Image (tube, rainbow, N blue to C red):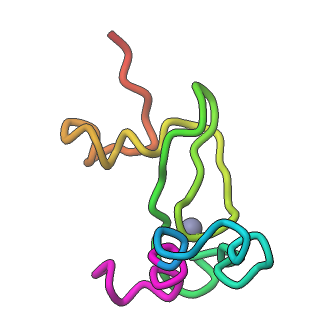
Amino acid sequence: MNEKRHPYAWRTQMRTWLPWFLIDLGIAAKGEDCEKSNATHRWYHIDTVFSGCYHCKVEREGKLWKAVHDKADTRYPHLETRT
Ligand SMILES: [Zn+2]
């Protein structure tokens, strides 16, 4: 899906523009769940175990962000790469 048409993308963008206190008030809070809006998550690296979504509050176990950063994994984003 085109990032510009993502239903929560504007709020993600807002968080880069707004001062933190407005974000804290919930003005640009994260969406509930991208998939509920028929959109895709955009993962980032939280720690060695969890991945979080830039657009919504969903956090999942696994290196989901790897599929974005590592081209070799894009075909099998659900699989770990063992070296
Ligand atoms: Zn999401």
Residue in view at x 43 percent, y 35 percent = 79
Q: Quadrant of residue 70?
A: top left
Residue in view at x 32 percent, y 85 percent = 4
Q: Left of 26 or right of it: where is 10?
A: left
Quadrant (top left/top right/bottom left/bottom right) for the C terminus: top left
11, 75: nearer the viewer: 11
Q: Residue furthest right?
A: 25
Q: Residue furthest top?
A: 83
Magenta segment range? 1-13
Give the total of numbered labels.
0
Q: Left of 41 or right of it: where is 74?
A: left
| Ligand 1 placement by image quarter | bottom right
Residue in view at x 20 percent, y 36 percent = 72
Q: Residue furthest left?
A: 71
Residue 39 vertical placement versus 43 (above, below): below
Q: Left of 60 or right of it: where is 76?
A: left
Residue 52: percent from left, percent from top: 59, 51
Residue in view at x 47 percent, y 44 percent = 64
Quadrant (top left/top right/bottom left/bottom right) for the N terminus: bottom left
Q: Quadrant of residue 20?
A: bottom right
Residue 53: percent from left, percent from top: 56, 59
72, 7: nearer the viewer: 7
Residue 62: percent from left, percent from top: 56, 37
Residue 54 vertical placement versus 15 (above, below): above
Q: Main secondary structure of the magenta part?
A: helix
Residue 24: percent from left, percent from top: 76, 70
47, 23: nearer the viewer: 23
Whether residue 29 is in magenta: the answer is no
